[in-house]
Structures are given as structure tokens and as C-alpha cells.
Image (cartoon, grey):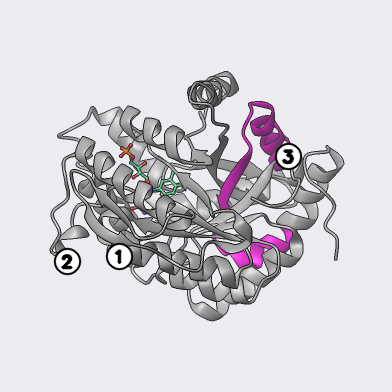
Amino acid sequence: MHGANKLQIGLFGPNCSSGRAVTLVPERWSGNWPDNKRLAQMSDESGIDFLLPIGRWKGYGGDTDYQGTTLETVTWATGLLAVTKRITVFGTVHAPIFNPVVAAKEMVTADHIGEGRFGLNIVVGWNEGEFDMFGVEQRAHEDRYDYAQEWIDVIKMIWSDRENFEFKGQYLDMKGVRGKPKPYGGTRPVIMNAGASPTGQAFAVKNCDAFFLQASRTSLEDTQQKVRTAQKAARAQGREIGCYTVGVVTCRPTQKEAEDYFHYSIVERADWSAVDGILALKNISPQTVPMQDYLTTRSQYAQGMGGLPIVGDPDHVANQLADLAKAGLTGIAISLVNYIDELPYFCDEVCGRLQRMGLREKVSV
Ligand SMILES: Cc1cc2nc3c(=O)[nH]c(=O)nc-3n(C[C@H](O)[C@H](O)[C@H](O)COP(=O)(O)O)c2cc1C
């Protein structure tokens, strides 16, 4: 990603209704285009580094039909790149359902419109229940990554100087392949992935520039260890990768106000029926996991789909983000209950503090 921030900050999930907050509160995120456009322009002007959408084809139900209304991510990114100047905007692409020649062309188009600011988030599998509507059978877990390897190899070849090439793999058999224009400025879009399994992580380390990992909720050392392991694995292949994580931020003038709002929005007023739908989809129930694990997971999903909750006053939030940087993370994709309402305060107070700590650059207007 562009820019010199030591700790990069992005916004995660604004293309979806409710964003990443499984909540009933009336101020929850609309996910509509006017709000997305306004948010992208605000973020661009405030020095936010990137926008990361969620590739979601079907909502999770519940009282709010959580993430039921979503803007398709590559077209969403293209529109936003046209109305912003410096922010990186990702498209999240499910490899098994996008033909790679079409995907390579769409992404290059977005990249030209954004003058090199398009990023690709490769998703290799997707939710059970979503793929039925494509009439495509989801492959076994390891096979998904074998397919995705061919998919990204073809895309990188199309983006390179090669022309009229043939590709014969186990899954893809393509002849006379070419794609012009090439990505903007003689480079290629930044690529990220968030594989969680050993196979998923190996795929990310081999192919991506940015790897998203789950930061520990309890130990900074654990997070540091995860970062080191991923970076070591990349270096063993002669590559450098940046490691990122996902956070759910509630920042208010006092610690108490922040904790009260967090409790109100995602405990008292959580959309528990949607949370239970998500858990059922992942086969997590009191019948399949021990009761205590079930309750912990249920509450973690309500609190932000597994992202790290960062709740507090600006000092607390800034210090927690600084700790993540100390653990070696390059950046974090955060979500807010209502991105537009909450972003200005976050940028003024938290990014201001991070600037003074030397972790972020001053925003030039
Ligand atoms: C930052 C981040 C973004 C993700 N974006 C999506 C997405 O947009 N759509 C989706 O279906 N899965 C998404 N995922 C899920 C991962 O891509 C991946 O499928 C999941 O972690 C399972 O990995 P595994 O195959 O190694 O088990 C995301 C996960 C993270 C942490």
C-alpha cells in the first residue's frame, strides 16, 4: 500500500449492511452507495490507508438480515477509486466463482481508474449455503487452495508481459491467453489473503503481499510470534510480507462511555438471532463444542465476527494500536458501528496520538 505509515489503518466491511456489527441499534451501518462514497472521501482526506470490503453473496438472516445487502466489491472499488485520490481500495474476489481472465481484466480496469490503488483480497472458499446459488460445488479444503494457486498464477501471468500464453493445470486449461492493458504504472495490484488453516497460511505466504492473521486477545507475545512465523516463512521463499489484523473499535471520550456503548450495541442490542445463524453455518453449537467454548465464541461473534475488540478512550485505543505495531503488525483493518459518525473522532483523537508516537504520518491536505 502507498504511504509511509508505520501502522496502516483501513476500514473493513463498509460495503455490507451492518458492516461488521451484528447489532439491532438504529444507527447501524446502511452499507448503501451514498454512505460508502461519502465514507471513502472522508477516509481519503483523513489519511486512512485502505478500504477492505467483504465479498458476501447472501446475508446471515436474523432480525436485521445481517450483511444481507451488499455492494459487489470489484465494482464498488472501481466506483470509489474514481472519486478518491490516495487511498487503496480492495476488491474481495472469491476465486472459484470468478473466471481468472475476467477477474484480471476487471481488476486492471479498477487499477487504471485508481492509478495503481486497487488491491486484491483473494478468498478461496466461502460460506456453505452461499455457493449453492451459483450452482458450483465447493471443493474439498486442500483442493480449493490448489485451484486458487492456478487461478492466481494465471492472473499474474496475464498481468505480466506474457502474451498469447497457454496454461494447462489440473483445473484450468486455457489457450492463447492475453490481457491488455497491463496494471497501472508497470507494477501489479497489492494482493492480500486471510487464510487461517496451515494450507491457507502457506498460500498467503507464497502469493500475497499482505497476510491477515488473528491477533491474540490475551497475549501480545502470541501475536508477535504469529507475525514472526509468517514473516520467516515468507523470507524462506525470498519474499517479504506485511502482517495485518482485524479490530473492532469503540472509541469515546471516556473509558466508561466506550464500554457502555460497546455493551449496549453488541450485548444488550446484539442481533442474537443473526449470531446464532452464523454459528449454525459454521456448525458451532452446544452439541458440537463444549458449552463454555460455545458461549465464548457466540459472544466473540457478536462483538465483531472474531475481530479484536478495542474499546476505550483515545489514549487507551491509541496505546492498544501501538502495542499491535510493537508486536510487528504492519496494519489493522477496523470496523465501527457507524463508520461515518465515528470516523472523524477516531481520526482526530486516535490517529493524532499515533502521529505523535511516530506511527503515522501527518496528513497533508
Ligand atoms: C481480513 C479478512 C477478510 C476476509 N474477507 C472475506 C470475504 O470477504 N469473504 C469471505 O467469504 N471470507 C472472507 N474471509 C475469510 C478468509 O478469506 C478465509 O476464507 C478464512 O479465514 C478461512 O481460511 P482457511 O481456508 O485457511 O480455513 C476474510 C477473513 C479475514 C480475516
Residue 133: which disc? 2
SS type, badge 2: helix
Mark closer to the chain start, 3 or 1: 3
Q: Nearer the viewer, mark 3 or mark 1?
A: 3
Q: Are marks 1 and 2 in contact (CB under 8 Å)?
A: yes
Q: Are marks 2 and 3 in contact (CB under 8 Å)?
A: no
Instruction: Give the CA distance from mark 1 to mark 2.
Output: 9 Å
Is residue 11 shown above or below 38? above
Q: Position of residue 168 (x, y in %)?
A: 22, 48
What's the residue type where badge 3 is placed?
Answer: Lys
> Considering the image in quadrants, where does the C terminus appear?
bottom right
Residue under the image location 16 percent in, 40 percent down: 140
Q: Which residue is mark 3?
A: 6
Tell me which numbered mark, 2 or 3, is placed earlier along the sequence: 3
Left or right: 3 in relation to 335: right
| Magenta segment | 317-345
Residue 167 % position (x, y): 27, 50
Indicate the secondary structure of the residue bearing disc 3.
loop
The disc at residue 180 is none
**Mark 2 C-beta closer than 8 Å to ligand 1:** no
- The residue at 31%/66% (across/down) is 63
Q: Position of residue 250 (x, y in %)?
A: 61, 50
- Mark 2 belongs to which amino acid? Met
Does residue 62 lie above or below 272 as drawn? below
What residue would you read off at disc 1? 57
Q: Which image quadrant is residue 179 in?
A: bottom left
